[in-house]
Amino acid sequence: MPGVEPEPSPLPVEVRPALRLASASGELLWMGGVLSSMGLVGVTTGFAVVPVGRFTPLEVMGSIVLFVLTTFAAVTGATLGRRSGPEVLYWQKFERAPPPPARGWLEPRRRTAVRAVIGAVGLVAGLAIAASVGLALTLLVLGKPRDEVLTHLPGAAELIAAGWTLVCGVVALRIGTWFSRWESRQRRSILCRPLSAGILAHVYYVAEAGPRSLTPRSPAPYRSRPGHRG
């Protein structure tokens, strides 16, 4: 109508997706338990089935070199140049961690357990491939003829992968125990995005006791302002 100003258009409504969070300690303990069990079974079965006594000295040396060097490099890379131990470094991350966002929701423990088991199985498969490729390259560098590399490669690679799996499992259990200890002392819960537990970085959220209050699966719409990026 003449003389009537048009009504301003409503602000656009941006709906942010819900942020799924998991218990960091639960994820680590589940994954560590599965990896430790699979690694222990793999090492025991490997030494019982694989004809280690038929390995040549070069194959034995190559297997030991690959396993020891990679394990030592991983441990050294995580601790070298740090004044505080890993446990203290994790605790410092937790003290500075923000509370969970309003759009976050805590997934059920069963889902966390299932994902941890699937992740552990996937990691074992990756370690088996890495052990086969790494051992073949190591033997070639040490001077073993190409036509003899595959003679005992499958058995030796299985033992190396099982050893790596066992080490990863023990480390995951250890870190998960640190997380649980901090939660018990502080009476708070450490949360993170799925498959992020154990990373020594600012990827954690800390919730007060009773984290199941984080269940806004349908978060309130977020109104964006003109020129404002949410």
Image: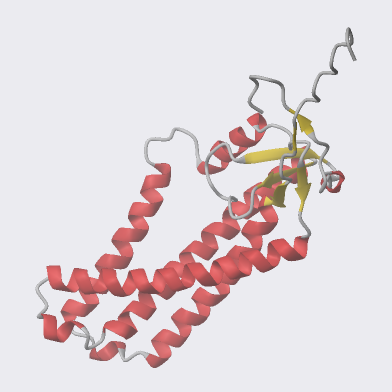
- Drawn side of residue 62 relative to residue 120, left or right: left
Q: Residue 58's image quarter?
A: bottom left
Could you tell me residue 168's position as x and y percent? 49, 62
Residue 143 sits above or below residue 105 on the image: below
Could you tell me residue 117's position as x and y percent? 62, 69
- Drawn side of residue 126 relative to residue 60, left or right: right
Quick one: quadrant of the C terminus? top right
- Drawn side of residue 40 relative to residue 185, left or right: left
The residue at the point 71 percent across, 52 percent down is 23
Residue 68 sits above or below residue 204 on the image: below
Can you name the residue that lies furthest to the top here? 3
Q: Residue 128's image quarter?
A: bottom left
Depth check: give the residue in front, 37 or 151.
151
Residue 56 sits above or below residue 4 on the image: below
Quick one: quadrant of the N terminus? top right
Could you tell me residue 67's position as x and y percent? 32, 66
Residue 184 sits above or below residue 94 on the image: below
The residue at the point 65 percent across, 58 percent down is 27
The residue at the point 60 percent across, 35 percent down is 93
The residue at the point 71 percent across, 49 percent down is 21
